[in-house]
Amino acid sequence: MLVSFSYHDRHSLVEKIDPRARWIFSILVMFAITLFWDIRILLFFLALTMGQYYLARLTWKETRRAWTFIFFIMSTMVVVNTLITSAGTIGEVMQGGHPIYEFTIPIFGWSLNFTLTVERLWFALTQIVRILSISALFLVIPFTMDPRQYGATFRGMGLPDRLAYSLDLAFRFVPTLSRDFQITLDAQRARGYEVEKLEGGLISQIRKMAPLVVPVTMNAILSGEDITNAMDLRCFGLHRRTWIQQLHYHWPDYLVIGLGVFLLAASIWLKWQGYGEFWVPDWLIS
Amino acid sequence: MEKKSLWAFGTREVVYSAIGAALYAVLSVATNFLQIPAAANVSVRPAVAIPMFFGLAFGPWVGFLAGFVGNIISDLISGYGFWLWWDIGNGLMGLIPGLIYLSITDFRSISNIVKAEIMVIVGAAVGMFVAALSEIWVSGVTFATTMATNFLPAFISNVVNGLILVPILMIAYGAIQARSGR
């Protein structure tokens, strides 16, 4: 099969928690993490999110692709940020500091002075910990949340019926449309369309995607009319909907939400007390 | 069908949002294996034309949901996690072309195609700008960094794909409309 979801039942502790509770927890913790630039606090959050990752029973094989993607994006951002555009949204990192390495690059008669400071390097490290904590927090979701429950989950979190239903419907269309795509691809190949050998420049290559994209899209639009009619005939949207997947909160779910609320509240309190700003260990700069 | 309100969200919109989102997700994942080697490490994703076109054809809400939900589903299939701000950026990329939805009656007229192309550029610019800006808040990078590493590659790739594929989709849709009297 061309397209399939990464979810399968792993009998892990994380899956036993109500998906609504997990979304609420994840979003609260994300806001808590973004309050800090102190690596000590960020390491606590990294441990917390990696704990969740561990409890989800994910294997390296499954998540390798996602981690590669995260490391690629993260390293480009951090390298460009530290070396080229001079570190950080925080002023104190950019000004002054303790130089480790200085060099001058001559460009067309000008000379570009560059100073790598302890603060800049430490900021880069802090940044890595922060990005990894947020990534690990959300990385587990695709692997551990049943796609069939998304509609009911978001309805349960207060989304209007129509929006939640649309979300649910989208998940259900994925297998059908991926089959349509495969059929179209095979049909075009039979007519001599060489998808593996798209020649020409960038623009003509994109243009050559049209024989695949157009039939699949137009077919889907035509079948959409039938679905709309069928739903209208069944009086869709007249009353509040009921859902096949029922979700019920249990005490561990309240505990998870409570933990999220506590972490965010504690973080706001710490921030208010003046903790959590960018921190460099004394032994590094003394 | 009579076009009425710009922001209406009835049965038709529910269905087309779902179809747009699923199409965006499937085509993004399916064309991954086609990896077109483009200049400067820009990954080319022809599927971005889908939310833009669905916005133009079915209104701003449909465009937004096709981009927003479609990006979530494609990340779920590829196992990349959940990136709310990039999902919103993709949604805006579909919503903005949708703002001229009421003014488009003939999908094959040159003036409408030109209008649509302008909205594609604005949509890609605003959508990717919003997503890139949020990286300043989340990852703590500077404005210049996020513009260079996040905004520019995404914007260029999306705008090129949109500019080429949206008119092709519009002409094909115009033909269907004319034939079936929709």
Image: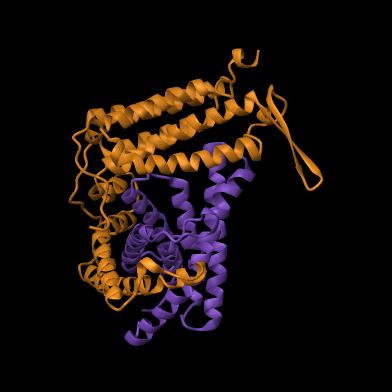
Give residue A202's position: percent from left, percent from top.
50, 66
B51 lies left or right of A186: right
Point out residue A142 in the picture as x, y percentages from the top left corner.
31, 44
Q: Is residue A151 above or below residue A67?
A: below
Q: What colour is chain A?
A: orange
Left or right: B59, with A145 as reference point: right
Looking at this view, name the residue that lies furthest to the right. A109
Residue located at (56% from left, 20% from top): A275
Left or right, residue A173 beside residue A208: left
Image quarter of residue B181: bottom left
Q: Which chain is purple?
A: B
Can residue A66 be seen here? yes
Vertical placement of residue B96 versus A207, above or below: above
How many marks do you count on the picture? 0
Residue occupying image coordinates x 32% and y 85%: B180
Question: Would you say residue B101 is visible in this rendering?
Answer: no
- Rendered-image quadrant of the N terminus of chain A: bottom left
Q: Residue B158: where, in percent of width, then height? A: 50, 61
Q: How is the image coloured?
A: by chain
Nearer to me, A238 or A285? A285
Give the image quarter of residue B117: bottom right
Tell whether A242 sits left or right of A110.
left
Residue at x 46%, y 30% (from the top left corner): A32
Task: Give x and y (percent) for residue A198.
Answer: 42, 69
Along the line of sight, the residue nearer the viewer: A234 or B76: B76
Q: Quadrant of the C terminus of chain A?
A: top right
Residue B130's place in the image compared with A223, above or below, is above
